[in-house]
Amino acid sequence: MLRIATGKAHAVPRAADEIVLAGDTTIAVGRRILGKPEDEADLRRMLALLSGRRHHCLSAVCLIGLDGKARTRLSDTVVTFKRLTPQEIDAYVASGEGMGKAGGYAIQGRAEGFVRFLAGSHSGVVGLPVFETRAMLMSAGYPFG
């Protein structure tokens, strides 16, 4: 995760007076890693796997500051979905919201209604852990009031 975020950050051309912020998010269920669904069938498989289970949302962030130094942070958020009915899975798949999303869901949308428990960073599940990103910016010399 951190390697991928760092690679993304280094892939962006950066002028001397610019910073670069890049991230990557992965969903882990047991020993399985869920990326972005390839199609609706894959999305259904992911939602069925997440149904009624606890999983980890891992969001990595890399900041390259004005000094050229790469700083990284990893946010690990535990999320538990309620048991999903076939109708809920069908409706979510039909909404199109889960396509292109790690683990096949967007917590900032309809999937928020599936979350029974969350421990960690809600913004990390969205894709950018704000607390960790702010800490990196501060460590790179960007003050916050």
Image (cartoon, rainbow, N blue to C red):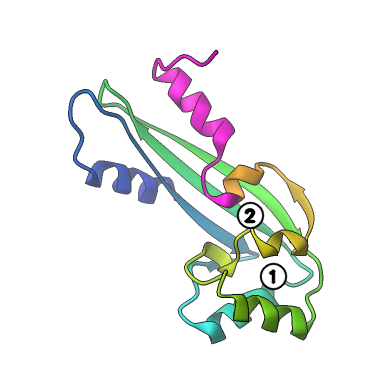
Residue at (58% x, 45% y) in the render: 124
Q: Is residue 69 left or right of residue 106?
A: left
Q: Residues within 10 Å of mark 2 (few under 14, many from 20)?
A: few
Q: Nearer the viewer, residue 12 or 28?
A: 12
Distance of label 1 from label 2 (alpha carbons): 17 Å
Residue at (60% x, 65% y) in the render: 105
Q: Residues within 10 Å of mark 1 (few under 14, many from 20)?
A: many
- Above or below, 142 against 78 in this view is above
Identify the residue at the far front of this view. 95
The x and y percentages for residue 113 are 76, 62
- Secondary structure under the numbered disc 2 in the rendered image: loop
Q: Which residues are magenta?
A: 126-145
> Total number of numbered labels?
2
Question: Mark 2 sits on what residue?
Answer: 108
Say which mark, if any, is on residue 50. 1
**Mark closest to the chain's N terminus, 1 or 2:** 1
Residue at (30% x, 47% y) in the render: 7
The x and y percentages for residue 17 are 22, 23
